[in-house]
Amino acid sequence: MAHSSTSRSRAWLAGLAGGAAAAAGCFSYGVFVERNWFVLRRETVPCLPAGAAPLTVLHLSDIHLTPGQGKKIRWLRSLAQLQPDLVVNTGDNLSHVDAITPLLQALSPLMEFPGVFVPGSNDYFAPMPKNPLRYLAGPSKLPDGARAVREPVRLDTAALHAGFGKGGWINLTNRSQSIAMRGLRLDFTGVDDPHLNRERYAGWPAGAVGQETHRHVKIAVAHAPYQRVLDRFTADGADLILAGHTHGGQVCVPGYGALVTNCDLPTWRAKGLNDWKHSGRTSAVNVSGGIGTSPAAPFRFACRPEAVLLTLTAGP
């Protein structure tokens, strides 16, 4: 009987050691391999009016740059080889107070192309360590003692936006604007980060000649894809909505997908191109899985960092 008990103990310890080794291997893979294993996702969106020529849109989100991230910087610069018609940046570009200059240098080849942008929370504040329960449960569901108490470090958002503006990109923070491209009018509306409750919907650009009769497409842009924002955009006729924030879940279960989205979006929508329906209307929504991670959690699993190249085509 004693021999049997000893054997079971040894088997249990061997299993525990094996599990610990597997966990350590997954952690090392997530830190040293997958978070720098960048990928380009390609999607086709039939949202343009009949007869319109295709347009390519490069969607960037959640770069979370820190100084010294050479692999990420080189990959970002290489994306200019795609020669997109338009670049859309949906925020959370920074993760360090000294990251603005290297970020602008990394994106400078892409600023040769027209672009628009909105900010995320990490374009205003540097990330800081947080109770992991806050991410899973949301701060409103935690006792006061479980919430972060340190004041976040403010970033130089004005300098970041000035750099984008100098490169020709249009700021859509609670603003709307139109761009003419290949005989088509691109109507944009954008909001400040819904994750900070800063969104103020500006509607679509008004006053254009032939506002509704001239060929146009309506594109809405936000950092965090909260359902209230998607509903508002869709109800007001958006043909395409672009957002990020979720990191695709960042840590996913193979065969299942994301466990969290860090907002009220369902986990099965954490990344990818899907339809969003509201008030009898339907909008195509692309949620980027993001390019970076917070320095506090530099880890990805079953969720490679991505940029997205969308080819917009004439609808059926």
Image (spheres, rainbow, N blue to C red):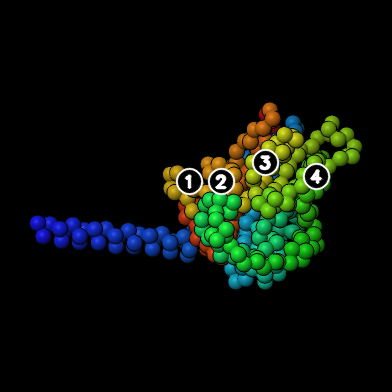
What is the distance, in whole Å, between disc 4 and disc 2 at their CAs?
Answer: 26 Å
Q: Which residue carries the number 1 mark?
A: 257
What is the distance, in whole Å, between disc 2 and disc 3 at their CAs?
Answer: 16 Å
Task: Check whether the beta carbons of the residues at disc 4 and disc 3 lie within 8 A of each other.
Answer: no
Q: Which badge, 2 or 3, is on the more N-terminal residue? A: 3
Q: Which badge, 4 or 1, is on the more N-terminal residue? A: 4
Q: Which residue carries the number 4 mark?
A: 202
Secondary element at image label 4 = loop
The amino acid type, in three-letter code, at marker 4 is Ala
User: Measuring 43% from the left and 44% from the top, which residue is drawn there?
Assistant: 255
Q: Which residue carries the number 2 mark?
A: 270
What is the distance, in whole Å, between disc 3 and disc 1 at their CAs?
Answer: 23 Å
Residue 168 location (% of width, % of height): 80, 57
Q: Which badge, 4 or 3, is on the more N-terminal residue? A: 4
Secondary element at image label 3 = helix
Is disc 2 surrounded by few (<14), some (14 to 19) or many (20+) residues within 10 Å?
many
Please, is residue 41 above or below residue 300 in the view? above
Task: Check whether the beta carbons of the residues at disc 1 and disc 2 lie within 8 A of each other.
Answer: yes
Relative to 200, 66 lies left or right: left
User: Measuring 65% from the left and 65% from the top, which residue is drawn there?
Assistant: 152
The amino acid type, in three-letter code, at marker 2 is Ala
Q: Is residue 306 visible?
A: no
Relative to 23, 7 lies left or right: left
Q: Which residue carries the number 3 mark?
A: 228
The label nearer to you, 4 versus 1, is: 4
